[in-house]
């Protein structure tokens, strides 16, 4: 659509194993029937609000949601052999079941169109499909996000969406998945196309980057609307900052576990102790106070008060964790995680 990533990343074994929604639903029925029950409840909720005339559109989106969720569960979740503690099918439910529901309660269903609600749910299912891409693509968008976009397009195709008729949905998801790229540092600004990009979620910087990379985007109302949805989607993805503190702490622990797994460090060995300590103290402070920013008015309205309420606890737990191990270094990353969990619960 905009960036041309759909031709850069080929289907893998997971896509071939789960080629369509029927195969995905069979897997979910066997392993996670609660996900299918959630999909059914949400279909009924959307039909009740927007009317039965939209049943085919909602059904296609339900199939695509099931296919994306099942593929993530098989590739990096509890259904396969490459388990990621954070980026798995439960993260889909965090966004689609918990955070989107919070948006519905606070904003009201009438705040967004049916197409918008469907796009945000599909973002939840598809934005983290790929987590093992070796390299990035040109520009500030991560390789994982670019590959996830390419697969998302194929999922939409397989579930009955059409790239001409449903161009707005494809473009919204392309922009939203690109905008979910989360950088700890601003990329090296050695070319004008990246000079406008900073750290945190890329969604905040997408218009400026598009000005440099695709200047003809102005006046395309589908891109303009897609950028709005991309900002809301980024806030859904990072809403742990504004959820209850127990959920924020739990997400930090899962991210820490995944970080150590990806680095090849044993959580029960001494080698993982210093990185876990930095991640759960200084790293959490930096994420919360420096890198996280609300990208949309909607996100701040729903989750802003929660973030304000969490600020003092983030500082206190980080300081207490550093103090816990000031005199004697932790024996392992697992020991750090246990201490962090105890402090967070207290």
Image (cartoon, rainbow, N blue to C red):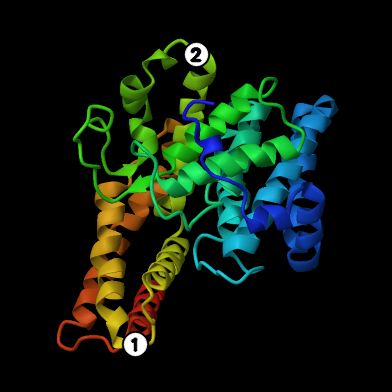
Disc 2/disc 1 C-alpha distance (Å): 54 Å
Marked residue nearer the N-terminal end (2 or 1): 2
Q: Which of 194 and 342 is in front in this view?
A: 194
Residue 299 visible, this orientation: no
Q: Quadrant of residue 82?
A: bottom right
Residue at image mark 2: 220
x, y percentage for residue 10?
Answer: 58, 46
Q: Quadrant of residue 107?
A: top right
Residue under the point 55% across and 27% down: 171
Which type of secondary structure does the marked residue at label 1 adopt? loop
Residue under the point 75% across and 31% down: 49
Residue 269's tag is 1
x, y percentage for residue 123?
Answer: 57, 42
Q: Nearer the viewer, residue 13 or 171?
A: 13
Q: Tell me: residue 25, above or below residue 163.
A: below
Q: Nearer the viewer, residue 248 or 39?
A: 39
């Amino acid at each position: 659509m905009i960036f041309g990533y759909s031709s850069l990343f080929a289907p893998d074994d997971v896509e071939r194993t789960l080629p369509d929604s029927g195969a995905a639903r069979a897997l979910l029925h066997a392993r996670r029937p609660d996900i299918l029950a959630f999909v059914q409840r949400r279909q009924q909720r959307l039909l009740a609000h927007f009317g039965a005339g939209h049943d085919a559109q909602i059904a296609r989106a339900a199939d695509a949601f099931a296919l994306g969720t099942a593929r993530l569960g098989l590739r990096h979740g509890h259904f396969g052999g490459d388990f990621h503690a954070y980026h798995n099918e439960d993260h889909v439910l965090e966004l689609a079941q918990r955070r989107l529901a919070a948006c519905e309660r606070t904003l009201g269903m009438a705040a967004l169109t049916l197409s918008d609600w469907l796009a945000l749910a599909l973002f939840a299912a598809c934005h983290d499909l790929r987590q093992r891409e070796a390299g990035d693509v040109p520009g500030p968008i991560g390789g994982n996000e670019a590959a996830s976009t390419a697969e998302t397009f194929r999922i939409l195709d397989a579930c009955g969406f059409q790239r001409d008729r449903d161009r707005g949905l494809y473009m919204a998801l392309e922009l939203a998945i690109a905008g979910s790229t989360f950088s700890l540092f601003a990329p090296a600004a050695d070319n004008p196309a990246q000079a406008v990009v900073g750290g945190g979620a890329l969604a905040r910087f997408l218009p400026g980057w598009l000005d440099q990379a695709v200047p003809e985007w102005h006046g395309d109302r589908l891109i303009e609307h897609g950028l709005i949805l991309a900002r809301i989607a980024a806030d859904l993805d990072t809403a742990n900052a504004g959820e209850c503190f127990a959920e924020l702490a739990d997400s930090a622990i899962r991210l820490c576990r995944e970080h150590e797994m990806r680095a090849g460090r044993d959580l029960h060995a001494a080698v993982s102790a210093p990185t876990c300590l930095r991640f759960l103290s200084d790293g959490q402070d930096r994420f919360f106070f420096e890198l996280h920013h609300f990208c949309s008015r909607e996100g701040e309205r729903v989750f802003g008060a929660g973030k304000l309420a969490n600020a003092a606890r983030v500082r206190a737990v980080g300081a207490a964790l550093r103090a816990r191990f000031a005199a004697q270094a932790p024996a392992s990353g697992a020991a750090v995680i246990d201490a962090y969990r105890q402090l967070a619960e207290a």
